[in-house]
Amino acid sequence: QVQLVESGGGLVQPGGSLRLSCVASGSITSIDTMGWYRQAPGKQRELVATITTGGSPNYADSVKGRFTISRDNAKDTVYLQMNSLKPEDTAVYYCHTVLFRADWRKYTYWGQGTQVTVSS
């Protein structure tokens, strides 16, 4: 079994900052890509940012210049630093990973989600 546990969500005023964390644990041989997606009420889940094992990031246009994704491979952890938050960033944020287990096949896992609310 593999688990992704997110933390760091909450309520913040527009212009504020939050930092999300996600730790992967369980039967993991090697982690490939880690990332964050979000889903606002009434909308489809969308990519926020992903990062490769080597540290190459990819961002949605809507968050470029405001959000920074990073990872600690030794801790199987991915972070999302969110600055200059806007009300439209309000959503449930989901951690996502593609990893290899003992059979060296790729598996995809999702976290349970953490709520981020940007409001005055």
Image: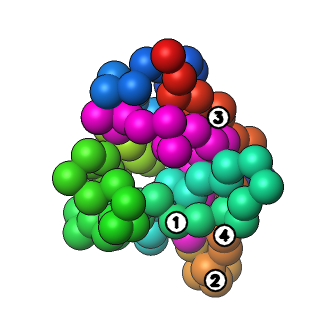
First in sequence: mark 4 vs mark 3: 4
Q: Residue at x 72, y 60 (%)?
A: 43
Viewer-closest of 9 and 74: 9
First in sequence: mark 1 vs mark 2: 1
Residue 78 rendering spot, x and y as whole percentages: 41, 46
First in sequence: mark 3 vs mark 1: 1
Q: Quadrant of residue 15 in the image?
A: top left
Q: CA distance from mark 4 to mark 3?
A: 18 Å
User: What's the mark number on residue 96?
Assistant: none
Q: Quadrant of residue 86 in the image?
A: top left
Which residue bears the numbered disc 4? 108
Dot in front, 2 or 4: 4
| Region of the chain picked out in magenta, as a range | 82-98
Disc 2 and disc 4 in contact, CB within 8 angstroms:
no
Helix, strand or loop under label 1: strand
Helix, strand or loop under label 3: strand
Any part of residue 59 in sight: yes
Helix, strand or loop under label 4: strand
In the displayed structure, does residue 70 sit left or right of residue 95?
left
Q: Quadrant of residue 84 in the image?
A: top left
Task: Judge the density around disc 1: few (<14), some (14-19), many (≥20) Cα neighbours within 10 Å.
Answer: some
Identify the residue at the far bottom of this view.
105
Which residue bears the numbered disc 3? 114
Residue 88 rendering spot, x and y as whole percentages: 51, 44
User: What's the mark number on residue 105?
Assistant: 2
Q: Residue at x 38, y 60 (%)?
A: 62
Disc 3 and disc 1 in contact, CB within 8 angstroms:
no
